[in-house]
Image (spheres, rainbow, N blue to C red):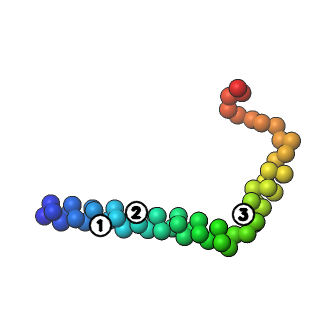
Amino acid sequence: MIEYFIDFTIVAILVIGITAVMGVLTNGIGEKFFGRKKGTESFDKSANMQAGWKSVGGKNK
């Protein structure tokens, strides 16, 4: 019975791991080939909106 749980755990870890890796690879490929320049558009708009904001929280170094 212990062997069953060990096998089940190994298969579960492999399935979850392979699924996670495939998701990251697919996302990277999609952004690389189909993302064009729009990948930084959202970041740029956010940075422009936050320009001049006063920094709050955290430690000043």
Q: Residue at x 21, y 62 (%)?
A: 5
Residue 2 horizontal/vertical position (percent) = 15, 60
- Mark 2 or mark 3, earlier in chain: 2
- At numbered mark 2, what does the secondary structure look like: helix, strand or loop? helix
Look at the numbered disc 1 and give the secondary structure of its residue.
helix
Residue at left offset 25%, top offset 66%: 8
Considering every residue shown, the one lying at the far left of the view is 1
The residue tagged 1 is 11
Residue 38 horizontal/vertical position (percent): 75, 66
Check if mark 1's residue and mark 3's residue have beta carbons within 8 Å: no
Amino acid type of the residue that numbered disc 3 sits on in the rendered structure? Gly
Q: Image quarter for residue 45?
A: bottom right
Residue bearing mark 3:
39
For disc 3, the neighbor class at 10 Å (few under 14, some 14 to 19, many from 20) is few
Name the residue rendered at 44%, 68% in the picture: 19
Label 2 CA crowd tier, 10 Å (few <14, some 14–19, many 20+): few
- Given the image, on which type of amino acid does mark 2 rest? Gly
Q: Residues within 10 Å of mark 1 (few under 14, many from 20)?
A: few
For marks 2 and 1, give the CA distance.
10 Å
Does residue 51 lie above or below 1 as drawn?
above
> Which residue was labeled with disc 2?
17
Label 2 – label 3 distance at C-alpha:
26 Å
Identified at 65% across, 67% down, the residue is 32
The image shows residue 46 at horizontal and vertical percentages of 78, 54
Q: Quadrant of the C terminus?
A: top right
Please report whichever mark, 1 or 3, sits nearer to the chain's N-terminal start: 1
| Position of residue 21 in the picture relative to residue 57 (left or right) | left
N-terminal of the pair, mark 2 or mark 1, is: 1
Question: Mark 1: which amino acid?
Answer: Val
Towards the viewer: 55 or 17: 17
